[in-house]
Amino acid sequence: MASTTLRKTLRSRGHRTLIGVLVAAREAAGLSQRDLAVRLKRPRSLIGRIESGERRVDVIEFIELARVLDVDPRQLFARMFD
């Protein structure tokens, strides 16, 4: 069986694409980072760390972000490949 290893993804091309999709969705929703944080009941600094590439977003967080932005998570994910 072939051995595979996971690469570090923080600040990778894919991670930057994900950030771009999330920022575009937030801006399309007309929300500031602070507005989004309030909706998520999280500190604004969390949104800042995500959008600056300092912090990864796991799958559950991604779904939560999409729903708060009023976007279907599957459609938001598909935007990464447009």
Image: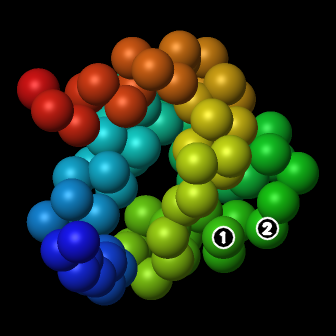
Q: Which mark, residue 34?
A: none
Task: Give the answer, above or below, for where 36 lies relative to 1.
Answer: above
Q: Is residue 79 visible?
A: yes
| x and y percentages locating residue 81 in the rendered image | 15, 32
Residue behind mark 1: 46
| x and y percentages locating residue 22 in the rendered image | 41, 43
The quadrant in which residue 25 appears is: top left
| x and y percentages locating residue 79 in the rendered image | 25, 27
Q: Is residue 82 left or right of residue 54?
A: left
Is mark 2 in CB contact (under 8 Å) with mark 1? Answer: yes
Q: Secondary structure at mark 2?
A: loop
Task: Give the answer, above or below, for where 47 lies relative to 59.
Answer: below
Q: On the rendered image, what quadrant is the N terminus found in?
A: bottom left
| x and y percentages locating residue 12 in the rendered image | 20, 74
Q: How many C-alpha atoms fall within 10 Å of the one at disc 1: few (<14), some, or many (≥20)?
A: some
* Distance between mark 2 and mark 1 Cα atoms: 6 Å
Residue type pointed to by label 2: Pro
Q: Is residue 5 left or right of residue 28?
A: left
| Residue sitting at x 61%, y 17% | 70
The quadrant in which residue 63 appears is: top right
Residue 35 versus residue 16: which sits nearer the camera? 16
Residue type pointed to by label 1: Leu
Task: Give the answer, above or below, for where 73 lies relative to 72.
Answer: below
Q: How many C-alpha atoms fall within 10 Å of the one at disc 2: few (<14), some, or many (≥20)?
A: few
Residue behind mark 2: 43
Task: Give the answer, above or below, for where 25 lies relative to 36.
Answer: above
The quadrant in which residue 15 appears is: bottom left
